[in-house]
Amino acid sequence: MFEVISKNKIKFEDLKKTILNKCLEFLGQLGCAKAGIMIIKPNIIKVNTKYVNDVRASLTLIEKINNEKVIIKTTKIS
């Protein structure tokens, strides 16, 4: 689970697109395929357990979504 902190509300589609693009940029196509990233809800990502830390790292690299400054904070891992 994660939390998006921003001044304005972020649309789920924009959030999803940004997360997938940043993971692709950070992990590459092969890494993303192996991680099996699935964004289930606006605050839940399903990922292969071997790639949890890699995906968390790529989330921390997200600074803006549609020119809106954001902070993405991991709140729970299970």
Image (cartoon, rainbow, N blue to C red):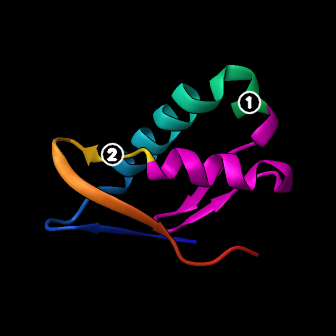
Percent of width and height locating residue 7: 14, 68
Residue 71 among magenta residues: no
Task: Examine the rendered structure and indicate whether residue 23 appears above or below residue 60.
Answer: above
Q: Quadrant of the C terminus?
A: bottom right
The structure residue drawn at horizontal position 54% and vertical position 77%, both measured from the top left corner, is 75
Q: Quadrant of the N terminus?
A: bottom right
Q: Nearer the viewer, residue 13 or 15?
A: 15
Q: Nearer the viewer, residue 60 or 36?
A: 60
Q: Earlier in the sequence, mark 1 or mark 2?
A: 2
- Secondary element under disc 1, as helix, strand or loop, is helix
The structure residue drawn at horizontal position 14% and vertical position 65%, both measured from the top left corner, is 8
- Secondary element under disc 2, as helix, strand or loop, is helix
In the displayed orientation, state which residue is furthest to the right: 50
Would you identify the image quadrant in which residue 49 lies?
bottom right
Residue 51 among magenta residues: yes
Task: Examine the rendered structure and indicate whether residue 78 appears above or below residue 35.
Answer: below
Badge 1 is on which residue? 31
Give the crowd class for mark 2: few <14, some 14-19, many >=20 residues within 10 Å: few
Tag 2: amino acid:
Asp
The structure residue drawn at horizontal position 48% and vertical position 35%, both measured from the top left corner, is 22
Badge 2 is on which residue? 14
Mark 1 vs mark 2, foreground winner is: 1
Marks 1/2: CA distance?
Answer: 22 Å
Q: Which residues are magenta?
A: 34-60
Percent of width and height locating residue 76: 62, 78
Give the crowd class for mark 1: few <14, some 14-19, many >=20 residues within 10 Å: some
Tag 1: amino acid:
Gly
Percent of width and height locating residue 45: 62, 59
